């Protein structure tokens, strides 16, 4: 099973693309989950949803849909003290999504270094007791293919946690000629790409451009890797970004078309129906 998604579902720019032009924002998730069976869930990184919102997410998504949610920044970016109580309150908040929550995504900042691994061990001990976890690191030392990377991967394996793969090569392969590209290149990290699967649920975040030819060149090697994971019985999670995420659904759909498997994303979109009516 391939789980496929974008960073968000509530994007009004996707009207006349994957959403009908008259769709209300409260209907976005239900319609998003017609085509995508997962979402990256970035919003939880910045602000906590209300308990009512969490219940609504559970109700509006279909039974086969799987969320990934980011640990709040206030918890993932503070290493001076392990905030056990605050973390437990957040875990309690998202508990109603348990049956649909595939991964808790712990995104760590670039200043998270080997000296903070004891803090990470405490986080993993708390998180992995409740949910499956994927950890994203951004410090270059964790890509050394030597002491520091080995220590990190060993720690993750000990807790049954996955390591997030972040591939932004396509984004940085083009000159920033638009505000959206400038902003994306300023905010996104540019790090070595190590194709790794520590568990049965590898997680890939691919950041592309609005040029599908460029995207195809850079995601080409991932087609074979994802096929390999599927053949091995793994359930990969692949999330696709574009500079302002306007074309993220198109990028994800093109990837699946090139992958050559059946997936809900290939079902007709409102955009397809509009084009057919014009013909």
Image: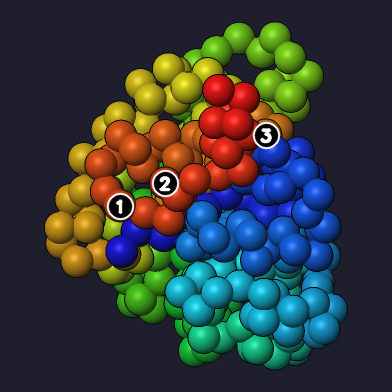
Q: Are marks 2 and 1 in contact (CB under 8 Å)?
A: yes
| Element on which disc 1 rests | loop
* Mark closer to the observer (2, 3): 2
Residue at 78 percent of width and 54 percent of height: 23
Res 222 quadrant in image: top left
Residue at 68 percent of width and 63 percent of height: 29
As drawn, 118 above or below 262:
below
Label 3 vs 1, first from the N-terminus: 3
Label 2 vs 3, first from the N-terminus: 3
Characterize the local packing of mark 2: few (<14), some (14-19) or many (20 or more) Cα atoms within 10 angstroms. some
Q: Position of residue 185 (x, y in %)?
A: 65, 25
Q: Position of residue 237 (x, y in %)?
A: 41, 58
In front here: 108 or 214? Answer: 214
Residue 70 visible, this orientation: no
Residue at 62 percent of width and 50 percent of height: 7
Q: Which residue has dot 2 on it?
A: 266
In front here: 130 or 272? Answer: 272
Q: Are marks 3 and 1 in contact (CB under 8 Å)?
A: no
| Element on which disc 2 rests | helix
In front here: 265 or 20? Answer: 20
Res 198 quadrant in image: bottom left
Separation of marks 2 and 1 at Cα, in angstroms: 7 Å
Residue at 15 percent of width and 58 percent of height: 231
Q: In the rendered view of the protein, which quadrant contains the C terminus?
A: top right
Separation of marks 3 and 1 at Cα, in angstroms: 24 Å
User: 27 left or right of 114?
Assistant: right
Q: Which residue has dot 1 on it?
A: 262
Q: In the rendered view of the protein, which quadrant contains the N terminus?
A: bottom left
Separation of marks 2 and 3 at Cα, in angstroms: 18 Å
Q: Give the numbered dot on residue 246.
A: 3
Residue 208 visible, this orientation: yes
């Amino acid at each position: 099973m391939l789980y496929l998604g974008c960073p968000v579902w509530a994007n009004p720019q996707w009207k006349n693309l994957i959403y009908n032009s008259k769709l209300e924002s409260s209907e976005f998730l239900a319609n998003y989950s017609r085509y995508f069976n997962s979402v990256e869930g970035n919003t939880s990184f910045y602000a906590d949803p209300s308990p009512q919102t969490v219940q609504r997410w559970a109700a509006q998504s279909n039974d086969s849909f799987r969320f990934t949610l980011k640990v709040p920044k206030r918890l993932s970016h503070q290493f001076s003290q392990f905030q056990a109580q605050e973390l437990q309150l957040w875990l309690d908040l998202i508990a109603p999504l348990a049956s649909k929550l595939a991964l808790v995504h712990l995104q760590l900042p670039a200043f998270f270094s080997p000296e903070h691994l004891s803090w990470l061990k405490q986080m993993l001990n708390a998180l992995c007791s409740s949910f499956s976890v994927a950890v994203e690191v951004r410090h270059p030392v964790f890509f050394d293919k030597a002491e520091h990377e080995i220590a990190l991967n060993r720690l993750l394996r000990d807790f049954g946690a996955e390591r997030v793969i972040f591939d932004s090569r396509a984004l940085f392969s083009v000159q920033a000629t638009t505000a959206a590209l400038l902003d994306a290149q300023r905010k996104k990290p540019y790090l070595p790409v190590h194709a790794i699967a520590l568990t049965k649920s590898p997680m890939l975040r691919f950041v592309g451009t609005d040029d599908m030819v460029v995207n195809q060149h850079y995601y080409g090697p991932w087609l074979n890797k994802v096929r390999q994971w599927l053949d091995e019985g793994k359930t990969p999670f692949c999330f696709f970004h574009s500079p302002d995420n306007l074309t993220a659904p198109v990028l994800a759909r093109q990837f699946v078309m090139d992958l050559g498997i059946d997936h809900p994303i290939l079902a007709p979109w409102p955009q397809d129906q509009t084009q057919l009516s014009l013909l």
